[in-house]
């Protein structure tokens, strides 16, 4: 098997992304007639989740099952041998014989890159601390591509909330930078975009601005809001200060373009009012559904078996 890990959104070229979006659309349409696309029958996915997760882990596992594969799982540091003092390296080393693909979520930035260097099966970064979450960014990009013509039109994306620690935002900026997009980062400066991401945008001549005023969403085609990442704050009072600062509700949407889409990687706390859930602008539950199709694509991508989808057409 050709080993291809997914560690950072940087690794994808524009043509990789166009291919992934096309195959995800194909999978979405194939699943209307098939419950399963049996391509990974001989494969086992290990989901190693050392931080809380619902959608990411379940959608990876469901994606594997829908591809005919099987899954083994280790969840939570406290229930694994890491709690007995084992190193991550030793924990992962055995996976080479137990599984063919490893999806890992870990609180330390760069953990999945270390994992990929330690083992010979593909490693998928399912979130590394405040670093990145590249597979979430793929499903976010797919969601945007369903609602907006990103191939032919320029889009303006407003990111709202915890832009410092929000790893889904870090990865999505990198993917959208390969398309015709500009950005508005809406947050208090204490939890604004880290310098390394700003430098990368500047180096690529990508237009962006920063503000703390949520009304800037009025100019945007896409509004992407995140929860304030409580678990990353060293000082809890800073979290308390920001936790309910921005709330997207009907009143705010009145000021926005009628065709704005509101995205959220979930889980949400108070930052998106449930009063907008039924509005056409609210696409966050669709986004979670698209996670299944996107992750099916990515499991085929890492195993080098994307072409096998053609047999189902
Ligand atoms: C996100 C994460 O884990 O970074 N959740 C997810 O995977 N959908 C966002 C978050 O936890 O706020």
Image (tube, rainbow, N blue to C red):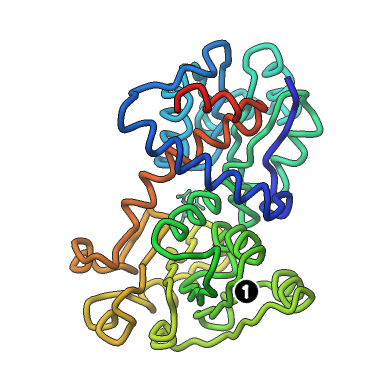
Q: Residue at x 37, y 77 (%)?
A: 246
Q: Say which quadrant the C terminus sits in.
A: top left
- Quarter of image, res 176: bottom right
Q: Say which quadrant the N terminus sits in.
A: top right
Residue 2 in the image, given as x and y percentages of width and height? 75, 25
Residue 198 in the image, given as x and y percentages of width and height? 70, 75
Q: Residue at x 39, y 39 (%)?
A: 28
Apparent side of residue 241 relative to residue 177 in the rendered image (left or right): left
Residue 229 in the image, given as x and y percentages of width and height? 49, 61
Q: Is mark 1 within 8 Å of ligand 1?
A: no
Apparent side of residue 58 relative to residue 180 in the rendered image (left or right): left
Q: Nearer the viewer, residue 308 or 228?
A: 308
Residue 24 in the image, given as x and y percentages of width and height? 49, 41
Apparent side of residue 10 relative to residue 234 in the rendered image (left or right): right
10 Å crowding of disc 1: few (<14), some (14-19), many (20+): many
| In the depicted structure, whether residue 90 falls above or below residue 279 | above
| Residue matched to label 1 | 193
| In the depicted structure, whether residue 117 falls above or below residue 99 | below
Q: Residue at x 67, y 47 (%)?
A: 16
| In the depicted structure, whether residue 269 falls above or below residue 4 | below
Q: Residue at x 39, y 88 (%)?
A: 215
Q: Nearer the viewer, residue 199 or 2?
A: 2
Q: Secondary structure at mark 1?
A: loop
Q: How many marks?
A: 1
């Amino acid at each position: 098997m050709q080993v291809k890990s997914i560690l950072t959104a940087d690794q994808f070229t524009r043509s990789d992304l166009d291919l992934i979006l096309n195959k995800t659309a194909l999978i979405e349409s194939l699943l209307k007639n098939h419950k399963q696309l049996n391509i990974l029958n001989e494969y086992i996915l290990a989901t190693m989740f050392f931080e809380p997760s619902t959608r990411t882990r379940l959608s990876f596992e469901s994606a594997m099952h829908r591809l005919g594969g099987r899954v083994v799982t280790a969840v939570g540091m406290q229930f694994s041998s890491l709690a007995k003092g084992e190193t991550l390296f030793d924990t992962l080393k055995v996976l080479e014989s137990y599984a063919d693909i490893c999806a890992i979520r870990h609180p330390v930035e760069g953990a999945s890159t270390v994992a990929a260097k330690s083992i010979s099966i593909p490693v998928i970064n399912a979130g590394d601390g405040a670093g990145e979450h590249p597979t979430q960014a793929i499903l976010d990009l797919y969601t945007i591509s369903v609602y907006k013509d990103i191939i032919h039109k320029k889009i303006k994306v407003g990111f709202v909330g915890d832009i410092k620690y929000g790893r889904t935002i870090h990865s999505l900026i990198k993917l959208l930078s390969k398309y015709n997009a500009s950005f508005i980062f809406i947050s208090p400066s204490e939890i604004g975009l880290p310098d390394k991401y700003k430098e990368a945008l500047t180096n690529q001549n990508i237009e962006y601005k920063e503000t703390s005023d949520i009304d800037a969403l009025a100019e945007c085609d896409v509004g992407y809001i995140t929860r304030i990442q409580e678990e990353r704050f060293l000082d809890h009072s800073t979290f308390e200060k920001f936790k309910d600062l921005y709330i997207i509700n009907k009143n705010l949407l009145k000021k926005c373009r009628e065709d704005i889409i509101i995205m959220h990687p979930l889980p949400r706390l108070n930052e998106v009012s449930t009063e907008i859930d039924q509005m056409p602008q609210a696409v966050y539950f669709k986004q979670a559904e698209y996670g299944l199709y996107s992750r099916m694509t990515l499991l085929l991508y890492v195993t080098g078996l994307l072409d096998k989808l053609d047999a189902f057409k």
